[in-house]
């Protein structure tokens, strides 16, 4: 049985060895990055974001365009259209968009609208608020002219009905752990986060998700929360997160990454620091749980680190070349 003490001992061993981190750093070294995003499906999102920048769009235009790609993908069950529903069969979406001047908009538990990221941007631009949730967010989207979209597809509904055969509906903490999970697998791909910069070092970011599969109705994870799913600061950098959102919100994970960068750590060192902090803080509670962070500074340097193997991220350089990398992890299994 792995205990808190043995987990910490493992951390010390891995931190002392660090060949995986060094190999990762070497693999990621290259031309300065312009756009980075979580997971392998981030490559298509990056391409859309780069095309928007190349056509004269702003950084906010770019990250919004990138996020819209997985939101509209019927084969992606973790973001937008065709996302897996909550336990009651409702698909609800969370999203946030932010630039480095402190402008931010977010929505949580949004229904009946495909592009949550666009609604989040409209919250930023058209309201005095930073976040709208639930029925209010859905009504705002309708009032703003966003078309109705039935988000639950036949494939996602089938998966939900299969889950219902064995699921016990009750407000039990961590009952999602009964779902068979493969580290880095489909049920861990619960979000896409994007970060982009221009040649002057200005930054913007976006994060969008349909949330944890078969979550309790009303559950909101880290993704739409500034400082958890996304944080961007002028002259310092930006960070986004992925994995089990509850573990990110406990420590305001992306705000911590950016704070470490502000204190002088590289994006890579900052991501490693926050992942190790989660492991130290939570011990056995995070056994088998995936959490990952991705960071970008104004010079185009990247950081990426996660708890378990399987986290991937897409990097697009200033020439538009996109490469998918594997993130280094604290634990090996």
Image (cartoon, rainbow, N blue to C red):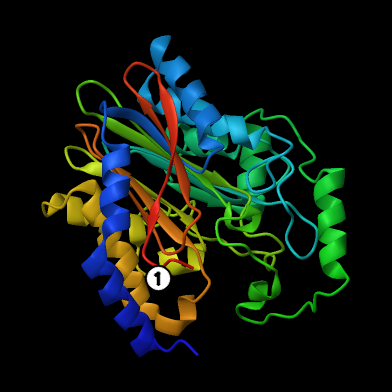
Q: List x then y, in percent, for residue 63.
A: 44, 30
Specify whether residue 64 is in view: yes
- Which residue occupies the foreground of this view, 286 or 183? 183
Looking at the image, the residue that sits furthest to the top is: 55
Q: Is 142 situated left or right of 89 in this image?
A: left
* Above or below, 12 relative to 190: below
* Above or below, 164 relative to 255: below
Q: List x then y, in percent, for residue 60.
A: 40, 28
Q: Is 155 situated left or right of 64 in this image?
A: right
Q: How many labels does the image show?
A: 1
Residue that carries the numbered disc 1 in the rendered image: 250
* Above or below, 128 relative to 190: above
Report the residue at 26% width, 76% height from top.
Answer: 12
What is the quadrant of residue 15 in the picture?
bottom left
Q: List x then y, in percent, for residue 300.
A: 25, 32
What is the quadrant of residue 196 in the picture?
top left
Q: List x then y, in percent, for residue 233.
A: 24, 43
- Which residue occupies the foreground of this view, 110 or 239? 239
- Which residue occupies the foreground of this view, 276 or 175? 276
Report the residue at 42% width, 56% height from top.
Answer: 292
Q: Is 280 situated left or right of 54 in this image?
A: left
Report the residue at 26% width, 26% height from top.
Answer: 31
Label 1 secondary element: loop
Mark 1 crowd level (few <14, some 14–19, many ≥20, 10 Å Cα): few
Report the residue at 74% width, 80% height from top.
Answer: 170
């Amino acid at each position: 049985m792995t205990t808190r003490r043995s987990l910490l001992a493992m951390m010390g061993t891995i931190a002392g060895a660090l060949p995986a981190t060094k190999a990762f750093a070497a693999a990621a070294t290259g031309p300065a990055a312009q756009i980075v995003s979580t997971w392998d499906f981030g490559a298509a999102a990056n391409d859309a974001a780069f095309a928007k920048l190349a056509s004269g769009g702003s950084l906010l235009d770019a990250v919004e365009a990138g996020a819209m790609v997985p939101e509209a993908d019927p084969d992606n069950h973790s973001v937008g259209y065709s996302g897996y529903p909550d336990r009651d069969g409702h698909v609800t979406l969370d999203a946030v968009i932010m630039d480095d001047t402190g402008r931010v908009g977010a929505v949580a538990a949004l229904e009946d609208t495909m592009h949550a990221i666009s609604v989040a941007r409209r919250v930023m631009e058209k309201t005095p608020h930073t976040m709208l949730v639930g029925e209010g967010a859905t009504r705002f989207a309708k009032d703003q002219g966003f078309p109705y979209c039935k988000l639950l597809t036949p494939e996602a509904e089938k998966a939900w009905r299969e889950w219902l055969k064995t699921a016990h509906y009750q407000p039990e903490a961590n009952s999602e752990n009964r779902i068979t999970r493969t580290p880095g697998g489909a049920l861990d791909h619960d979000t896409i986060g994007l970060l982009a910069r221009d040649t002057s070092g200005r930054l913007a970011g976006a994060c969008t998700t349909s949330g944890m599969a078969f979550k309790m109705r009303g559950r909101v994870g880290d993704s739409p929360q500034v400082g958890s799913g996304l944080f961007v600061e002028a002259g310092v950098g930006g960070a986004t997160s992925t994995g089990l959102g509850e573990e990110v919100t406990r420590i305001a994970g992306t705000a911590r990454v950016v704070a470490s960068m502000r204190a002088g750590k590289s994006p890579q060192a900052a991501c490693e620091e926050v992942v190790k902090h989660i492991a130290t803080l939570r011990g056995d509670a995070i056994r088998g749980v995936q959490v990952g962070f991705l960071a970008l500074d104004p010079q185009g340097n990247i950081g990426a680190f996660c708890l378990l193997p399987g986290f991937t991220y897409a990097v697009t350089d200033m020439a538009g070349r996109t490469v998918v990398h594997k993130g280094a992890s604290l634990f090996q299994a």
